[in-house]
Image: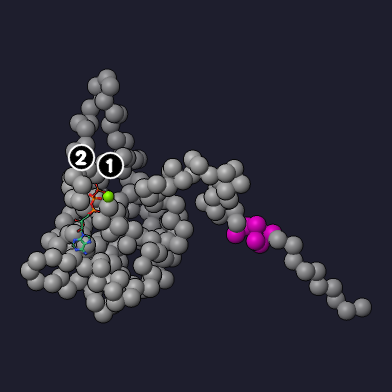
């Protein structure tokens, strides 16, 4: 599985315009490092992602879906409660020694400071083994709530991850009814929470 090389950064006619310094500084995933997760036995690092569009290509079964699963494993709330058999299914299985743990690290470019951490690069990783599951942020252990609030402060909700659009989701959106689409837009725009707050409340009158 490979990341398609970036096209040359030239301003020649027909080629994409050069990535601007502003785009380069915008928060984006710079690198993903996977080890022991599903089909990735050895350490595997895809780098360095463009702040624009990236295309991952590979033959059937080469690990593209497993790669995106690994990213969702760190950034979203899939696998909140992992049972022993779930943990086992995430660990690489194959010939040879069993893999004791799986680690996925997502490296963000944070030059625009969107993640409230005073670093240009933020490394968030999640590790799972047969007994447990843990997160670390720039090498320091953190808990799930801290990860959640960090991502939410940058506008990435772990529970409601519309920034991850999975295979089939676009087709699903195109075939939705209008009310379903409106519901989806409300959810994405977090209008639901506002609606809930604005819902009529019982009026409590002071006793006469
Ligand atoms: P396609 O183009 O068909 O969608 P893909 O590139 O998305 O393929 P994946 O679904 O990511 O491929 O990878 C599938 C491979 O991952 C299978 O060969 C499967 O056996 C392997 N695999 C899945 N889980 C594990 C695991 N726990 N240990 C080892 N290999 C695994
Ligand atoms: Mg696939």
Residue 8 in the image: x percent, y percent? 20, 31
Tell me which residue sits at (38%, 70%) in the image: 80
Is residue 1 something one can see in this rendering?
yes
Tell me where residue 134 appears, x and y as whole percent. Answer: 30, 73
Residue 6 on the magenta segment:
no
Image spot of residue 144 (x, y percent): 38, 71
Q: Residue at x 57, y 44 (%)?
A: 177
Say if 135 sits above or below 189 in the image: below
* Residue found at the very far right of the displayed protein: 208
Q: Mark 1 — residue?
A: 54
Judge by depth and name the residue closer to the eye, 113 or 71: 71
Pick out the residue farthest to the left: 96
Q: Earlier in the sequence, mark 1 or mark 2?
A: 2
For mark 2, what is the residue? 4
Which quadrant of the structure image shows residue 13? top left
Region of the chain picked out in magenta, as a range:
193-198
User: Gap between marks 1 and 2, in whole Å?
Assistant: 7 Å
Q: How many marks?
A: 2
Q: Quadrant of the C terminus?
A: bottom right
| CB-based contact (under 8 Å), mark 1 and mark 2 | yes
Q: Residue, x 24% and y 72% (percent of image)?
A: 88
Q: Main secondary structure of the magenta part?
A: helix
Q: Quadrant of residue 92?
A: bottom left
The vertical placement of 201 against 33, above or below, is: below
Place of residue 127 in the rendered image (x, y in percent of width and height, measured from the top left): 25, 69
**Coloring scheme used:** one colour
Instruction: State whether label 2 is within 8 Å of ligand 1.
Output: no
């Amino acid at each position: 599985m490979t990341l398609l090389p970036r096209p040359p950064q030239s301003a020649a006619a027909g080629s994409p315009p050069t990535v601007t310094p502003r785009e380069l500084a915008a928060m984006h995933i710079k690198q993903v490092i996977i080890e022991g997760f599903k089909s990735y036995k050895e350490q595997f690092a895809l780098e360095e992602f463009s702040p624009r569009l990236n295309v991952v290509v590979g033959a059937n079964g080469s690990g593209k879906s497993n790669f995106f699963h690994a990213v969702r494993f760190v950034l979203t709330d899939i696998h909140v409660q992992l049972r022993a058999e779930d943990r086992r299914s995430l660990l690489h299985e194959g010939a040879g020694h069993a893999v004791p743990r799986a680690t996925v690290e997502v490296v963000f470019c944070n030059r625009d400071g969107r993640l409230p951490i005073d670093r240009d690069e933020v490394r968030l990783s999640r590790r799972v083994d047969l007994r447990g599951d843990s997160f670390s942020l720039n090498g320091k252990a953190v808990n799930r709530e801290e990860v959640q609030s960090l991502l939410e402060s940058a506008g990435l909700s772990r529970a409601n991850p519309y920034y991850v659009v999975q295979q089939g989701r676009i087709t699903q959106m195109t075939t939705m009814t209008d009310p379903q689409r409106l519901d989806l837009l409300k959810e994405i725009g977090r209008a639901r929470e506002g609606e809930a707050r604005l819902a009529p409340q019982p009026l409590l009158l002071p006793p006469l």
